[in-house]
Amino acid sequence: MSATAHAPGSQTVMAQARHENFPVASMLLPRSVRAHLLAVYGFARLVDDVGDEVASDRLGLLDELEADLERVWGGQPRNPLIAALVPTVQACHLEIGPFRRLIDANRRDQIVKRYETYGDLLGYCELSANPVGELVLRIFGLATPERLELSNKVCSGLQLTEHWQDVGEDHARGRIYLPLEDLRRHGVAEADLGAAPASQPVRSLMEFEVRRARALLDEGAPLVRTLSGRRKLAVAAFVAGGRSALKAIERAGFEVLGPPVRAGRAERALEVIRTLVRG
């Protein structure tokens, strides 16, 4: 059967948008821009779900999704979430590279289950997260080398934040995104990541990783000051979503082995204001 038959349906994929740390497409943005952002989100979420949830041959299905992706630039895509990219790609003159990197990140997830160093993990973020920021800036028509560099820091920080929220869940799937060099430095064994509640060494490790993710977000936050109007607010919401999620982990005492800790709507809104004021 085809990837379209095995892949999650459009409604299932798009329903996950409300559970993200940040608003996928702010209602303050023009309707056409929101539609483009939702199209990119739908593709990224589809690829992630195939890489994480599908029980059959994931690598084969990812290959089929890439073949269907190529039809966006010449042909008729079969998967409705990929077909939804056609108007966005045409209107915003998007190239295939960032989309391919998102697929490559999920291929890597099928093969690579551990990351030895922080640098290795950031290399993964270059595939799994940074392309999304690039696509957002290109949809906004604001992609410059300087903005892309700042966006990469924001997106990598957001990706790390998501991983730190899901340490226990990822361990149950056989994956550890925490750098192994950091586990050793903090005296944490891999088995400790599956033993809730988190031990003190695990909490100490997560305190260190939260600081590092926050530093990335802070380094990328000046991106907000380079923007104006509703696009500035939208990017501030992305940064604020990551910052408030990290604060939620901190407030929970760095307990990351139970249900994922999420920030409330009011907390995220307050963090948006702080980000707009200070960057």
Image (cartoon, rainbow, N blue to C red):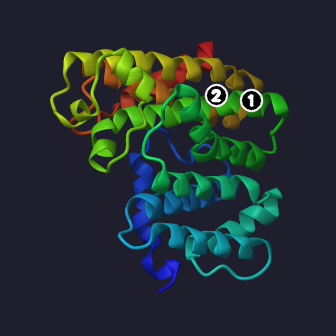
Quadrant where the C terminus lies? top right
Residue 58 lies, in percent from the top left, at 46, 67
In the rendered view, would you say 203 is above or below 133? above
Q: How many marks?
A: 2
Q: Residue at x 66, y 53 (%)?
A: 101
- Give the CA distance from mark 2 to mark 1: 7 Å
Residue contact between numbered discs 2 and 1, judged by CB atoms under 8 Å: yes
- Front-most of 206 and 27? 206
- How packed mark 1 is, by other alpha carbons closer than 10 Å (few <14, some 14-19, many 20 or more), is some
Label 1 secondary element = helix
Label 2 secondary element = helix
Residue 232 in view, yes or no: no
Residue 22 lies, in percent from the top left, at 49, 39
Residue 125 in view, yes or no: yes
- Front-most of 172 and 164? 172
Q: Residue furthest bottom?
A: 1
**In the image, is 165 to the left or to the right of 63?**
left
Q: Amino acid at mark 1?
A: Glu
Q: Residue at x 67, y 36 (%)?
A: 230
- How packed mark 2 is, by other alpha carbons closer than 10 Å (few <14, some 14-19, many 20 or more), is many
Q: Residue at x 81, y 28 (%)?
A: 146
Residue 16 lies, in percent from the top left, at 41, 55
Q: Amino acid at mark 2?
A: Lys
**In the image, is 172 to the left or to the right of 110?**
left
Q: Residue at x 25, y 17 (%)?
A: 201
Residue 171 lies, in percent from the top left, at 30, 42
Q: Residue 235 is drawn in which quadrant?
A: top right
Residue at numbered disc 2 = 153
Task: State the mark number for residue 149.
Answer: 1
Q: Residue 162 is drawn in which quadrant?
A: top left
Task: State the mark number for residue 84.
Answer: none
